[in-house]
Amino acid sequence: MAGESSIATPQRRADARVWLALWVVYIVWGSTYLAIRLGVRPAHGAPFPPLLYAGFRFTVAGALMLAFTVRRPAADGRPDPLGARQWFAGAVIGVALLLGGNGLVSLAEKRIPSGIAALVVATVPIWAALLGAVSGQERITLRHALGLALGFSGVAALVAGTGSGRVQFTGVLIVLAASLSWAAGSVWSRTAPTVRRPLVMTGMEMLAGGLACFAVGFAVGEGHDLHLGRTSTSAWLALGYLAVFGSLLAYTAYIWLLKNAALSLVTTYAYVNPLVAILLGIVFVDEPFTARTVLATVLITLGVILMVMRKGEARGVTRSGRARARKASIDGMERRVPPRKDRVTSAEGRTAPGPEGRPHDAAEQEAGCR
């Protein structure tokens, strides 16, 4: 009995750490949409221009991430060069995810509620599956086809017709474009020559994406709308929260979870985050929650669940299954072996859903952009 107790205690501690890290990902990433809203559309004071807001966030977060991680060797001890090819890959992915993804979400949140933006962003795994099929990397099964249909039906429910709860079409279209950009960068990253150290790669992407947000923001004239002296305190606090908690703390927790928890558990963030965002928007900025929003939430969430879950997960994950999943995620992070070009994988073969790297797949790329 004493032996069993001594074994159970470390297990309980490990389970507690897993759930603590998971709730950090749930709450922090779910709250980033509210923080973006507070920056680009504050109740008082001057707002941040959306692209420059994203630029501040990711440039600071990327520089800090690299400062803390770039000198650390790869876990397997093998060389992990950081040369021109790796920087080019990181820059392309960073532009797709953080300029095309987060930058467009920031633009959209000047028009639509933050919770709705989070809900539409949840379609990233749907776009990733479609792009993977087009590029020959995946096959779409009947279950995933149903997920596609449900997800896009949910988006249509937000903008179709007239009446209470209808969301501005332009804002939703901008977030759909952001989701497509995230998914495209994610699919391309699967065979890109990136570094194997996930946090280093994340820092490179954040830095490159942040600088790209600055460049485009100033190019389109956002500099004329930047009034730092009149920017509200809440907008500054939201920016600090996004950089430190949204881009550093939560992502570090996510990487730790990939090493220490079942993927079936980790990937639940894909449909928990929008629910958290919707709730926070209602509570803190009085965003509307109508029958139309309920319908769209149900449809999109069910669609994402069908896209995310792998075959057999509905029957639960056994202890040995958790160990295999953990080993698979570690192996993917350590080796980052590109898929053979002559091999087609099914959507069930993805390690995660579809987000604020990695092994670089759709879920982790989406996650890196929260």
Image (spheres, rainbow, N blue to C red):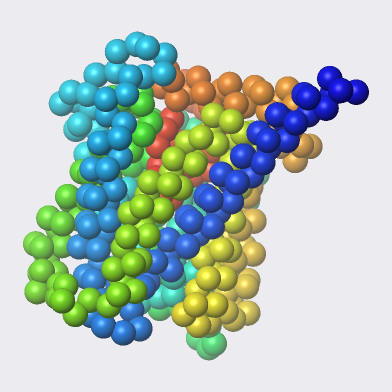
Question: In the drawing, does residue 306 fall left or right of residue 123?
Answer: right
Q: Position of residue 121 (x, y in %)?
A: 45, 58
Residue under the image location 42 percent in, 14 percent down: 76
**Viewer-closest of 64 and 119:** 64
Q: Position of residue 67 (x, y in %)?
A: 25, 36
In the rendered image, the vertical position of residue 274 relative to residue 169, given as above or below: above
- Residue at 44% across, 40% down: 252
Percent coordinates x, y for residue 148 in the rendering: 55, 52
Residue 285 visible in image:
yes
**Residue 177 showing in the rendered view:** no
In the image shown, does 79 or 20 lie closer to the viewer?
20
Residue 265 location, quadrant: top right
Residue 237 in the figure: left or right of residue 11: left
Residue toward you, 221 or 280: 280
Q: Is residue 284 left or right of residue 71?
A: right
Is 318 located above or below residue 59 in the figure? above
Q: Reply above or below: 70 against 78.
A: below
Q: How many marks?
A: 0
Q: Residue placed farthest to the top in the image? A: 78
**Front residue of this view, candidates 183 and 79:** 79
Residue at position x 66%, y 23% in the image: 323
Residue lying farthest to the front in this orientation: 2
